[in-house]
Image: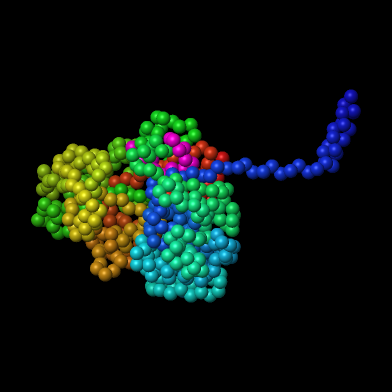
Amino acid sequence: MYGRILPIVLILGLLVSCGEEPKPVPPPVRKPLVILVGTDLSTFDPQILFEVDSSYVLGNIFDALVEFDSSFRLSPSLAKRWTNPDDQTWRFYLNEKARFSDGAPLKASDIRFSIERLKSLPNSDLRGFTEHISRIHVINDQTIDIKTDTPFSILNDLVFIPILSERHVLKMGDRIRERPLGTGAYQLAIHEPGKKIVLKRNPYYSPAPEVEQIDFVISTGRDRNLEEVLEMKPDLSVTLPFRKIEEFQKRNPPDLQILRSNGISVEYLMFNLRPSIPGFTKNPLLDVRLRKALAHAINKTEMIDAIFKGFGRPATQLIAPEIFGYDSTIRPPEYNVEEARRLIAEAGFQNIELPIYTFEGGTYRLEKLLIEHLNRAGIKSSIKTWKEISDMNSALNSGDFVITMGGYVPTSGDAAELLSFGLHTRTEGKSFGKGNYADYSNPEVDHFSEQNLRELDTRTRLDMLQQAMRIVNNDLPYLPLLIYDDVYVISKRIHWIPPASGEIKVRNISYR
């Protein structure tokens, strides 16, 4: 019986093999990937604005010479490799396969044009990234030299210089604001102002991303952010505030889930260190004992749990662990109300009142909790507000405040950015210290701020940055509070690992 079955099976197999080949199964038709964002774009020119919601869209249309990987390490992008012929020259060898979305190949002349254009834009938020570039020399279509005015580690700055097509910009003129053309994985298809932005796959991008179409839907406003998420069920949302997370989890939508990753934005208290401040003829904050008392008075863990629903971590210094220059040996003042009281008494500041300045609007939940903490240590406090952003900017520059809150993230992934912008002594007419609203000054920090930029050896630079961070931690011109997490709502049909930079590169998103 068994001997008869075998030939029949073989014959059936032969009949199948001799017949027509089976037709390939077509890939499944996917719905567009929907991303809910907070605001619309006012321009598609990538060299004008430096803001989060714009970067979500434009970061998928345009590339730079280099980029950050998921761990904030520099990696190739349009440049496949680079060398240093001398300490003021960076030579880049371009990816010969790179194409703009109209099929035109990327050329070194496009790199030169893009950088020179950015240097000439007076209204650009990104212009500062070209500050140390002195000259650009095209060697051939695939090789370019970028020369700096001094020995300078320029790679981190180049991450933020989008590369445009020279031919397209010259052809389009001002219409580049509505008709972008880049080498990124996607190209603009539709823009319905105030409603949505549709991107479609760049047919010349390699390797082709799995997602064919992206629909960026513009949120209708903060008052409805949770309801929007629950009704729309986007594949990815960046609009859900921390105070709505608990309600989202209680309602437990079956198709959506919370995705969290370590953020890199450090929230801090900034002390006004000018000789005189509002309400005081002699500034009490110049006494480091008072600043350290404030540090001991604040319970960072309670703050993270109460305000950020546990989605955060205490900050030990003004940069996150993911940033180059972070020093793991730094130990900030621990929460200790009795030590805070002792320092206040020692310095002779019992019953002192220190107002916290902030922008008008919102719930002031964080400020109120800080005031509660300070009251426990015997420091009176209150909230004072600025009505307009212009009022706030004027007060920060003139020193018309006592204490205020702020947040900072070195988008370059390098502490050198914080040192030169926010910690170097303010210098009129120069770029150093533009954001040093505390009016902090320390010659050693100034030295490390300037010298590390001229140093190309990575280990030496790291040592300089860490030395500077230790000095700043001891001086306490700013009091690091916490680093809140990046929190997203994502659909269960996609797979995505958020990078440390917080970028949303859809080419890295796949379907489950």
In the image, is residue 396 part of the stretch drawn in magenta? no
Q: Quadrant of residue 511?
A: top right
Q: Residue at x 18, y 52 (%)?
A: 402
Q: Residue furthest top?
A: 1
Position of the C terminus, as image quadrant, is: top right
Q: Is 379 positioned to the left or the right of 316 in the image?
A: left
Front residue (pair 418, 367): 367
Front residue (pair 87, 399): 399
Q: Position of residue 492 (x, y in %)?
A: 51, 37
Position of the N terminus, as image quadrant, is: top right
Q: Position of residue 165 (x, y in %)?
A: 50, 66
Residue range of the region highlighted in magenta in the rendering: 230-243
Q: Is 365 positioned to the left or the right of 38 in the image?
A: left
Q: Residue at x 49, y 68 (%)?
A: 171
Q: Quadrant of residue 88?
A: bottom left
In the image, is residue 231 part of the stretch drawn in magenta? yes
Q: Position of residue 311 (x, y in %)?
A: 37, 40
Front residue (pair 115, 173): 173
The image shows residue 265, relative to residue 311, as above or below, that is below
Q: Residue at x 16, y 43 (%)?
A: 381
Q: Residue at x 39, y 61 (%)?
A: 48
| Residue 336 in sight here | no
Q: Position of residue 486 (x, y in %)?
A: 40, 45
Q: Is 503 positioned to the left or the right of 140 in the image?
A: left
Front residue (pair 325, 220): 220
The image shows residue 25, relative to residue 126, as above or below, that is above
| Residue 163 in sight here | yes
